[in-house]
């Protein structure tokens, strides 16, 4: 099982965040996150948002450290990338 994590450089809610991804399957990603104690609510489309204070925990558990661009490349190459859906116009 290999999952990847980028550095905590993404601001939000007064914290810095990392992205935890798999290049194999969402099942692999969910299993890793569950074993780490990360709640499912931290899953967003194709990755888990990991707060900076949990970064070292993820690495100790086996997440491979990569850059943010590599996270995106891995998701695209694996076919697991899910983009945000555009808001649909309201019908009158």
Image (cartoon, rainbow, N blue to C red):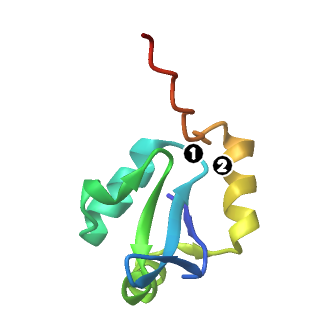
Please say if 40 is above or below 55: above
Residue drawn at 37 percent across, 83 percent down: 54
Neighbour class for label 1 at 10 Å: few (<14), some, many (≥20)? some
Q: Earlier in the sequence, mark 2 or mark 1?
A: 1
Residue drawn at 67 percent across, 62 percent down: 71
In which quadrant of the rendered image does the C terminus lie? top left
Q: Position of residue 19 (x, y in %)?
A: 52, 66
- Give the numbered dot on residue 75: 2
Residue drawn at 40 percent across, 43 percent down: 27
Frontmost residue, 2 versus 82: 82
Which residue is under mark 1?
24
Q: Position of residue 83 (x, y in %)?
A: 60, 40
Instruction: Tell me if 53 is positioned left or right of 64 in this view.
Output: left
Instruction: Tell me if 53 is positioned left or right of 22 in this view.
Output: left
Neighbour class for label 2 at 10 Å: few (<14), some, many (≥20)? some
Q: Quadrant of residue 39?
A: bottom left
Please say if 71 is above or below 63: above
Frontmost residue, 86 versus 31: 86
Q: Are marks 2 and 1 in contact (CB under 8 Å)?
A: no
Instruction: Tell me if 68 is positioned left or right of 92 in this view.
Output: right
Query: Mark 1: which secondary structure?
Result: loop
Instruction: Tell me if 67 is positioned left or right of 13 in this view.
Output: right
Q: Position of residue 7 (x, y in %)?
A: 60, 81
- Give the numbered dot on residue 10: none
Query: Mark 2: which secondary structure?
Result: helix
């Amino acid at each position: 099982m290999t999952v990847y994590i980028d550095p905590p450089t993404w601001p939000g809610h007064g914290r810095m965040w990392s992205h935890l991804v798999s290049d194999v399957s969402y099942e692999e990603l969910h299993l890793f996150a569950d074993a780490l104690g990360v709640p499912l609510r931290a899953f967003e489309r194709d990755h888990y948002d990991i707060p900076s204070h949990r970064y070292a925990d993820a690495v100790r558990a086996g997440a491979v450290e990569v850059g943010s661009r590599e996270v995106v490349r891995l998701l695209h190459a694996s076919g697991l990338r899910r983009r945000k859906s555009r808001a649909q116009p309201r019908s009158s």
